[in-house]
Image: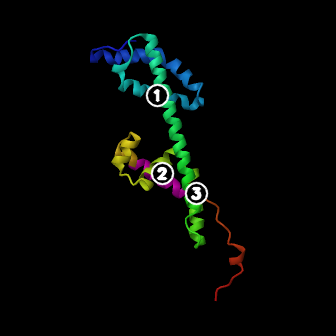
């Protein structure tokens, strides 16, 4: 289970560590988050382990504890990201209600946008926010998300399509009573 010094043995040593520690790491994560998310967290943790494989302690118990520390850090990063996404959604909803007081249509559109935004999955919100609010290009957003620029463009296309679909499926607002009785001359 100890990390080797030779490159050809690296894959074999990683597999050995993975086989030995994965079940415990998964249980470690499952005790802290929903079961359906635990596998993703542990998979992400083992990506970090692979990248930092030269830092794995030589003793088996130390290596196991080191992997648990990485799983914990991934969990903490995930929680921080979730809080940021929630805060962004709240800021968007707040700013949407404060956009325009003078024009009813603009206010209705802003409220509709905020409602549609809340219905988007977090991944769609994230890529739209990077492009629209942060003004990042696809290569820049790719660095933030850890994916290729092509994958960013694909996600952005899907996110825009989903946002449009949510906007199209919002219930149509009835005319306000004050305007409903007016006739045009």
Residue 40 visible to an observer of this rendering: no
Q: Which residue is mark 2?
A: 159
Location of residue 178 by image quarter: bottom right
Residue 45, percent from left and from top:
45, 27
Q: Is residue 154 left or right of residue 8?
A: right
Give residue 139's mark. none
Which corner quadrant holds the N terminus? top left
Q: Which residue is mark 3?
A: 94
Q: Foreground residue, 75 or 157?
A: 75
Q: What is the spatial separation of the Cα atoms under label 3 and label 1, in whole angstroms?
A: 36 Å
Q: Which residues are magenta?
A: 153-166
Q: Residue furthest bottom?
A: 185
Q: What is the spatial separation of the Cα atoms under label 2 and label 1, in whole angstroms?
A: 25 Å
Q: Does 139 lie within the magenta span?
A: no
Q: Residues within 10 Å of mark 3 (few under 14, many from 20)?
A: some
Residue 95, percent from left and from top:
55, 59
Q: Does 156 lie within the magenta span?
A: yes
Q: Foreground residue, 14 or 103?
A: 103
Q: Main secondary structure of the magenta part?
A: helix
Q: Which residue is mark 1?
A: 43
């Amino acid at each position: 289970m100890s990390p080797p010094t030779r490159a050809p043995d690296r894959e074999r040593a990683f597999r050995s560590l993975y086989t030995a520690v994965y079940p415990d790491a998964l249980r470690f994560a499952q005790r802290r988050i929903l079961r359906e998310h635990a596998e993703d967290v542990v998979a992400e943790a083992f990506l970090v382990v692979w990248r930092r494989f030269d830092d794995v302690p030589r003793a088996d118990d130390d290596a196991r504890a080191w992997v648990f520390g990485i799983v914990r850090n991934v969990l903490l990063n995930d929680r921080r990201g979730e809080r940021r996404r929630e805060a962004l959604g709240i800021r968007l909803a707040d700013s949407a209600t404060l956009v325009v007081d003078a024009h009813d249509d603009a206010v209705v559109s802003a409220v509709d946008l905020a409602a549609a935004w809340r219905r988007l999955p977090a991944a769609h919100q994230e890529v739209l926010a990077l492009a629209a609010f942060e003004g990042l290009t696809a290569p820049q957003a790719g660095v933030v998300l850890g994916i290729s620029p092509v994958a960013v463009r694909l996600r952005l296309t899907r996110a825009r399509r989903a946002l449009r679909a949510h906007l199209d499926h919002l219930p149509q607002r009835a005319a306000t009573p004050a305007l409903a009785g007016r006739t045009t001359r």
